[in-house]
Image (tube, grey):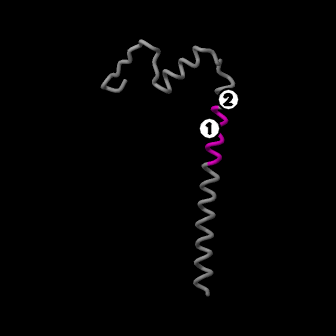
Amino acid sequence: MLALVVNQQSQIRSQKAKLQSIRSDIQVQEIKNSDVRHELQSENQSSEYIARVARESLNMAKTGERIFICPGGD
């Protein structure tokens, strides 16, 4: 009986640690989400902005453009 209680206490501690870790991850993600929302609100949603994001973040190009890749990285 005592072993069962000790085992349950150990499981509870483990679950509490996992919960705290998840809560911490949620806080980090909420901060990231807030930053993204702020960036979207503050940026000009013009076609130039959309083109810049497409090029820089999504590695996209306009029709007919050629993309050169340097083997050295940059």
**Amino acid type, callout 2:** His
**Amino acid type, callout 1:** Lys
The residue identified by callout 2 is 38
Residue beneath the point at 61% across and 54% down: 22
Q: What SS does tag 2 mark?
A: helix
Of residues 13 and 52, which is closer to you in this image? 52
Q: Is residue 29 magenta?
A: yes
The residue identified by callout 1 is 32
Quick one: which residue is furthest to the bottom in this view?
Answer: 1
The magenta region covers: 26-36
* Few, some or many residues within 10 Å of mark 2 (<14, 14–19, 20+): few
Residue beneath the point at 54% across and 22% down: 53
Q: Distance between the residues labelled 1 and 2?
A: 10 Å
Residue 41 circle label: none
Q: Tell me which label, 1 or 2, sits earlier in the chain.
A: 1
Q: Quadrant of the C terminus?
A: top left
